[in-house]
Image: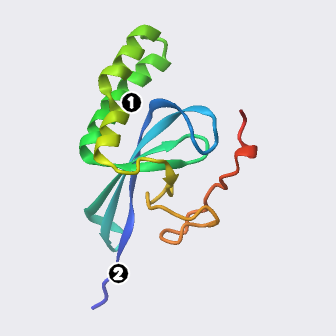
Amino acid sequence: MFFLFGWGGGKKQSFGPAVPVSCPNCHNQTFLNLVQIKKQFTIFFIPVGSYETINVLSCQICSRGMEISPAIFEKAKRLSEVTSVFLKNEMSKEAYEKSLADADLFEAINKENDNPNLQNVCPNCGKGYDASWKVCMKCSTPLKQKNASLCSR
């Protein structure tokens, strides 16, 4: 009998922009995207179950980001919904700024993480990588080069 199975591939779900920041890597004013990656085990290319979930906040321009915990993910998800409403001009700037202040997202990240700096994160699998890599060593996804001169300022 022959069985074909695999693991590592998965479902990537983007919740859109969550937090406005000045990216410390590319120095652009942008929003951090909220992304959830669920790794799956498959048999004959049919997903059987998830075995790992990675939550990431990453820069829209340079893909630099940070892995976040499930508790912070829930806060960021609610903030992403508010940001979506704001970007559609359905909310005033004052109300949006109040929502950002109430969320205390970065304060929660700083409390939970000793080093909350942005790192290189693969947009496909969510794992960190070295800035010199052209391809993710885990999932073989081509990676953006982190050259700030290529980004518009």
Q: Nearer the viewer, residue 21 or 60?
A: 21
Q: Crowding near pointer 2: few (<14 within 10 Å), some, many (20+)?
A: few
Measured in 3D between alpha carbons, the distance from the residue under mark 2 to the one under mark 1, in whole angstroms, is 39 Å
Q: Where 46 falls versus 16 (above or below)?
A: below
The nearer-to-camera label among 2 and 1 is 1
Counting residues from the start of the chain, the first of labels 2 and 1 encountered is 2
Q: Amino acid at mark 2?
A: Leu
Residue that sits furthest to the bottom in the current view: 1
Foreground pick, 74 / 14: 74
Residue type pointed to by label 1: Ser
Q: How is the image coloured?
A: rainbow
Residue 23 in percent (x, y) is at: 57, 38
Residue beneath the point at 27% across and 37% down: 74
Quarter of the image with the C terminus is: top right
95 vs 16, nearest the viewer = 95
Q: Residue furthest right?
A: 149
| Residue at the spot 36% in from the left edge and 75% down from the top edge | 6
Q: Position of residue 144 (x, y in %)?
A: 64, 55
Residue that carries the numbered disc 1 in the rendered image: 80
Q: Which residue is mark 2?
A: 4
The residue depicted at 41 percent of the width and 18 percent of the height is: 85
Q: CB under 8 Å between callouts 2 and 1?
A: no
Q: 150 left or right of 37? A: right
- Residue 145 percent location from the top left of the image: 67, 56
Element marked by disc 2: loop
Q: Secondary structure at mark 1?
A: helix
Residue at 55% x, 69% y: name it.
Answer: 140
Give the quadrant of residue 73. top left
The picture places residue 56, in percent across and down from the top left corner, at 40, 48
Q: Is 21 situated left or right of 8 in this image?
A: right
Is residue 118 placed above or below 10 in the rendered structure?
Answer: above
